[in-house]
Amino acid sequence: MINNWKLGLKSLDYAYGIKSNFTLMIVFALISVLFFTIGSSINCSIFGGYMLMCAAILPTQMVYSLSMSNMVQSSPMKKKMQTTIPAVFTCGNLVIMYLINVLIYGVMVLVHPEAALEKGSEILLLALIMMMMSAYLGIAYKYFGISVIIFFFVYCSLSIGRNFVILDQFGTGPVYFGVMAILGLVSVVAGGFLQYLVSLLVYKAPMSKMAQAAALRKEL
């Protein structure tokens, strides 16, 4: 698994639009800092985590762009580059970003223990969104139209699930937050497996040009 993640990281050297994507990652990271800074006062700190998630999936987009090249299409690594590597790479990146969110939210809970229920629910909601996003990535580069519908549900879950709360049989205060953080981590990892399974189901379908960056589509 680690080797596949490293291979995905190394493949970025040959990916399309690496400078623009990394610039966008920095922009997302800065926006996340803004949301985490002001989020508590306007009840939208979860958007900080959402921005970090967006930053985490941009490298996956670059990995998928490699499959548009003739070199990958004729390579024995073709199937792996469209299934195993993107799934492992996405899962690894999302786990890293999720743990950063857990750390930030954990600090919030330590400073304001009374917010443990709210922050615990938010961290689990964010993890579920990451899991759904992984499913989206598994199909987006094959069937772009269907994937947009999944993406729509991700946004709906973000707005509707803002008040999502697990019953207190899991404890209260920091204990509740800890349980939600662990459940969230399991959800993010499960999303990686889901992405892999979905990508296997659609592997034989051609890559969708519509799922690629506009500049790349002009060159195809």
Image: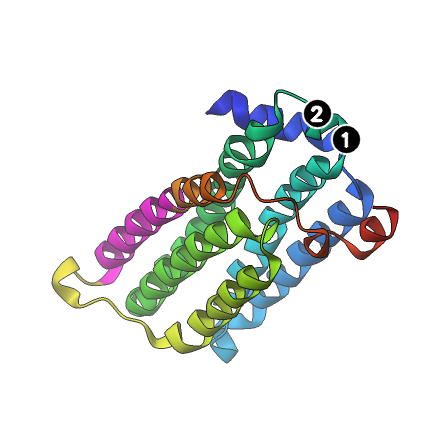
Find residue 198 and report its horizontal and vertical position in percent. Answer: 44, 45
Residue shown at the point (55%, 54%) measured from the top left? 53
Examine the structure image and report whether residue 189 is included in the region drawn in magenta.
yes
Residue 119, picture quadrant: bottom left
Callout 1 amino acid? Asn
Extreme residue toward the left, this view: 169
Q: Report the magenta stretch's main SS.
A: helix
Residue 196, percent across and down?
45, 39
Asked whether residue 86 is in view, the answer is yes
Q: How many marks?
A: 2
Kind of residue at badge 2:
Ser
Residue 112 vs residue 39, the one in the foreground: 39
> Is 167 included in the stretch rendered in magenta?
no
Contact (CB < 8 A) between labels 2 and 1?
Answer: yes
The span shown in magenta is: 173-190
Residue shown at 35% from the left, 58% from the top? 124
49 on left or right of 114: right
Check disc 1 and report the residue beneath it.
Answer: 70
Coordinates of residue 217 in the picture (x, y in percent): 81, 52
Q: Is residue 124 above or below residue 15?
A: below
The circle drawn on residue 124 is none
Q: Nearer the viewer, residue 71 or 56?
A: 71
Q: Secondary structure at mark 2?
A: loop
Decide if residue 45 is in sight here. Answer: no
Q: Secondary structure at mark 1?
A: helix
**Considering only vertical position in the picture, is 191 above or below 105?**
above
Q: Which residue position holds label 2?
A: 74
